[in-house]
Amino acid sequence: MLDKRRIKLAGAGFIFFSALMQIVFAANNAASILDASINWADESSKLKLLATVPQWDNQAMTALFDVYRHAERYQLPPVKDDKQYNIRFLNAFWGPLSNPFVKYPRPVKAFIFFDKSAQQQEISGPSVSTYMVPLIHNTTDNNYYIFDKSQAKPMLLNDWVNNLREAQHYPGAVRFNICDGYGDLPTDVCQQKNYQEETKDMDRDSGINLLHKPKIPSAYRPIQEDWTSRIDQSRLAQRLGMGGGSIYEQSIDWNNLDARNKLLNTVVSWPNFQTIKANFEKIRDIRYFQDEDYPGFARRVTWLYPDDGCWTRASAVIKDLFGPFNNIANNFTRPSKVFAFGNLCANTSNSPSGRVTWWYHTAPIVRDAETNLTYVLDPAVSPRVPLTMENWIAAITSRSDACAKSRSSIDTFNICNGYGTGPYNSCNDPTKVDYTTEVDAMLDQSFYRYEERSRQQELGRDANAVLGNQPPWINANN
């Protein structure tokens, strides 16, 4: 796989490649968070750093500190240490730096570095002790506060530093830095680290999350196969043995109108269609992933590779842009997930065959509070507008154009208001799924980003253009 990727990458345009290499060279020569830190006693330099700290009022700070201290309310499992706890708070509740849906600005990371004495180094290792916490500027009293889970309330930055110094008996110099990017380790360059890496850092090597997580199956179905042949009976038997049904097992007959309407009424609501459409466009267009093969090139969710990976797209949208359930840092309730099962076929210009076929498909879904209509947010199927549930089903069970001979149909569907991401997951049983279930699914986007780029090349498109600022949906002919 690696050799094939290198061969394909070698064909990129020289100018584009040269520009990227300049970015890489600059990044490799940038100072780390530790190396760029300042002396804590340098008041002038400290004030310059503090000028970059986001602002909240006292009411927001109090409410969000309560969120910070009680991760269990959001089905966020334990993590290994305080550093991971703090990274997860920022990553989970705010998502990417460019998130257009957050109510309050994302806190920055404050770093304090203490030089250890020779005796301390003999006992605990490295010569520098590092502490990292969320930092915010309180506009009510104009002070700077950090969040520390060992405290009962937000703590003044100066008090935190002084308390650490006294409690740990650090005699040497104290250094300070702030990172308003994804960097979370002393050796990181603050702005060089990407969102995916920060996400991995929040539970890397924790060894604590022991939930059974079945591998999410491919949604792909050969056009001649009946969808039921793709069902893994052994997994269903395993799920039944564990107690509780999976999303697939609990799906209902699409043709049962009363049951369908009852289930659709469980979909979360947004205020009106104008809001739904505006949010759909933001979800479709936001570029916050780092392209693994092209440093400095930001990527969207993989809408242009509809063949597979629907669960990673849905998880990325919901987890990254709306966060955990009951997230008060976000302006909107996180969408529900819709799952459709059957001989599915959708016409698309993003496949050489003009179609894609699945045995199941999932996407975010919301309900219009004014009309009670449900809309599916699925740019992989309909890139210009959100579709009503009925129109979305029609689009993924098409019998026209490239899908004319597909004999497509829907059998069952389900709505999930939980952290389940695939057909064999429980939707919301906290003993089987939690927030990290969506995290794992979102990280699978990495594989599909490579497939999406390869697909654009296969279709004869300028991959950097369509994956960048010129996606097909801005062209009226696509």
Image (tube, grey):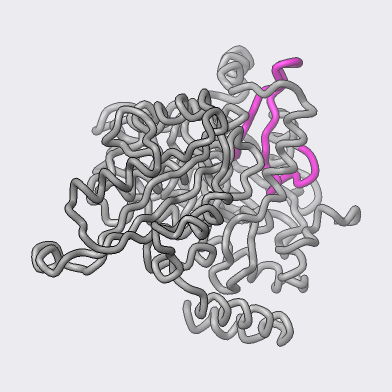
Can the viewer see residue 362 in this picture? no
Q: Is residue 30 above or below residue 326?
A: below
Residue displayed at 54% across by 43% down: 106
256 with respect to 285 (left or right): left
The image quarter containing residue 54 is top right
Q: Is residue 371 above or below residue 346?
A: above
166 with respect to 279 (left or right): left
Could you tell me how many numbered marks the image carries?
A: 0
| Residue at the right extreme of this rendering | 476
2 with respect to 457 (left or right): left
Between 308 and 66, the one nearer to me in the picture: 66
Start and end of the magenta stretch? 363-385
Q: Quadrant of the C terminus?
A: bottom right
Q: Main secondary structure of the magenta part?
A: loop
The image quarter containing residue 71 is top left
Please tell me whether residue 267 belongs to the stretch shown in magenta.
no
Residue 290, position in %: x, y? 57, 63
Residue 231, position in %: x, y? 43, 44
Residue 197, position in %: x, y? 45, 60
Residue displayed at 20% across by 64% down: 116
Between 94 and 472, the one nearer to me in the picture: 94
Residue 156, position in %: x, y? 39, 38
Residue displayed at 18% across by 51% down: 168
363 with respect to 396 (left or right): left
Can the viewer see residue 164 in this picture? yes
Please tell me whether residue 369 belongs to the stretch shown in magenta.
yes
